[in-house]
């Protein structure tokens, strides 16, 4: 019984083993197929890569061929240039002695010109230094002169103020006299007091009338308060000549001088220091109007008292400027 069962079970075991073998072979086949497909894909990729590399190498080969051709052309040109340079060098060698001599001559000329220019530059530098010294000296002198000018302008301004004040004082003292008889004006930085003959003298006389004496006393009072004012008395006449001599007077010169002297005496008697007063006669030669009518001649018969502030400060400044030159 046991043998029978064993005989019956034996074919089944054989079939199962074949089946397993078949399954194993099938699995191996599938794996081999998968591996073959993978290997095929890898081979295709490598083939493409090899193809791309071949294409790149062919392109590079063409480029190298082109470069080689260009290099050959450049080499030919270089050889040609080398031959030309060799010829030029040979010519230069042949002419070297003459060229060197010419260059030496040129160098000597340049050296001489350079030395001359350096000497001129030295002279110019000395001249420039001298000019700068002169400019500095001139600037110092200009500064000094500007300071002196400032002092002079200040002194002139003070002098102008003094003249204005003097004119105002004289005008105020003599305001009671008629304008035709007495005039006070300022000319050229001086105060002019012009007194008509009608106020001072009778015709042909050198004695001052009482009314004129009053005017002169008032003027002397003002001048006493102005010790820094110099007084010049000028006598003037018309052009009518003397018909005959009167005492010591023979002409208009005498008349003008004696009238000026008489007025000078009255001023000093009124208190003006004599050393401040100068008397002078101008005769008929400084008219203020043409001697063509009685009225014009009357204008010319006058005495002018010229009041000038002392200019000591101005003279000091001017002297110092002159000494500084």
Image (cartoon, rainbow, N blue to C red):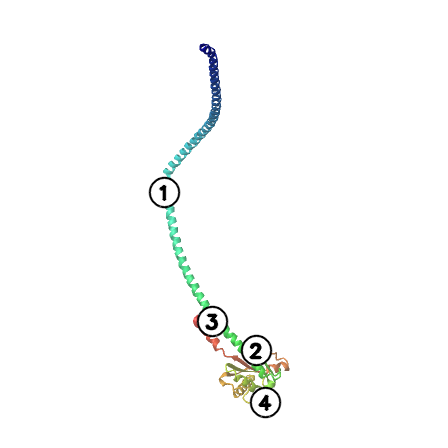
Residue 168 in view, yes or no: yes
**Which residue bears the numbered disc 4?**
210
139 versus 254 height, above or below: above
> Disc 3 vs disc 1: which is toward the camera?
3
Residue 225 appears at what percent x and percent y? 52, 84
Residue 319 appears at what percent x and percent y? 45, 74
**Which residue bears the numbered disc 1?**
100
Residue at 64%, 81% in the rendered image: 295
> Residue 169's image quarter?
bottom right
> Disc 1 vs disc 4: which is toward the camera?
4
* SS under mark 4: helix
**Which residue bears the numbered disc 3?**
148
Mark 4 surroundings: few (<14), some (14-19) or many (≥20) residues within 10 A: few
> Residue 95's image quarter?
top left
45 versus 196 height, above or below: above
> Residue 215's image quarter?
bottom right
User: Disc 2, disc 3: CB below 8 Å?
Assistant: no
Earlier-in-chain disc, 1 versus 4: 1
- Between the C-alphas of marks 3 and 4, the distance is 49 Å
The label on residue 186 is 2
Residue at 43%, 71% in the rendered image: 324
- Tell which of 42 and 233 is nearer to you: 42
159 versus 24 height, above or below: below
Earlier-in-chain disc, 2 versus 1: 1
- Between the C-alphas of marks 3 and 1, the distance is 70 Å
* SS under mark 2: strand
Mark 3 surroundings: few (<14), some (14-19) or many (≥20) residues within 10 A: some
> Disc 2 vs disc 1: which is toward the camera?
2
Residue at 37%, 49% in the rendered image: 111
* SS under mark 1: helix
The label on residue 230 is none
């Amino acid at each position: 019984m046991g043998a029978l069962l064993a005989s019956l079970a034996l074919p089944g075991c054989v079939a199962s083993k074949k089946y397993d073998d078949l399954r194993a072979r099938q699995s191996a086949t599938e794996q081999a197929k998968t591996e073959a497909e993978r290997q095929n894909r890898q081979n295709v990729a490598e083939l493409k890569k090899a193809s791309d590399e071949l294409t790149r190498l062919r392109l590079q080969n063409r480029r190298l061929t082109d470069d080689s051709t260009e290099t050959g052309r450049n080499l030919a040109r270089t050889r040609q240039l080398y031959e030309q340079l060799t010829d030029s060098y040979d010519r230069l060698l042949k002419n070297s002695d003459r060229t060197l001599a010419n260059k030496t001559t040129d160098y000597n000329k340049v050296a001489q010109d350079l030395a001359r220019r350096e000497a001129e530059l030295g002279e110019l530098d000395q001249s420039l230094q001298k000019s700068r010294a002169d400019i500095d000296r001139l600037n110092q002198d200009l500064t000094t002169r500007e300071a002196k000018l400032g002092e002079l302008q200040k002194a002139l301004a003070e002098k102008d103020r003094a003249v204005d004040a003097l004119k105002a004082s004289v005008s105020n003292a003599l305001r009671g006299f008629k304008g035709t008889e007495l005039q006070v004006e300022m000319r050229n930085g001086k105060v002019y007091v012009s007194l008509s003959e009608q106020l001072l003298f009778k015709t042909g006389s050198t004695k001052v009338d009482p009314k004129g004496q009053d005017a002169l006393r008032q003027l002397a009072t003002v001048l006493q308060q102005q010790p820094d004012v110099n007084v010049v008395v000028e006598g003037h006449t018309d052009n009518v000549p003397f018909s005959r001599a009167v005492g010591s007077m023979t002409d208009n010169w005498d008349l003008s001088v004696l009238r000026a002297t008489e007025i000078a005496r009255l001023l000093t008697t009124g208190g003006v220091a004599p050393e401040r007063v100068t008397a002078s006669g101008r005769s008929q030669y400084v008219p203020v109007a043409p001697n063509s009518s009685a009225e014009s001649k009357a204008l010319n018969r006058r005495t002018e008292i010229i009041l000038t502030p002392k200019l000591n400060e101005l003279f000091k400044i001017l002297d110092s400027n002159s000494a500084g030159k």
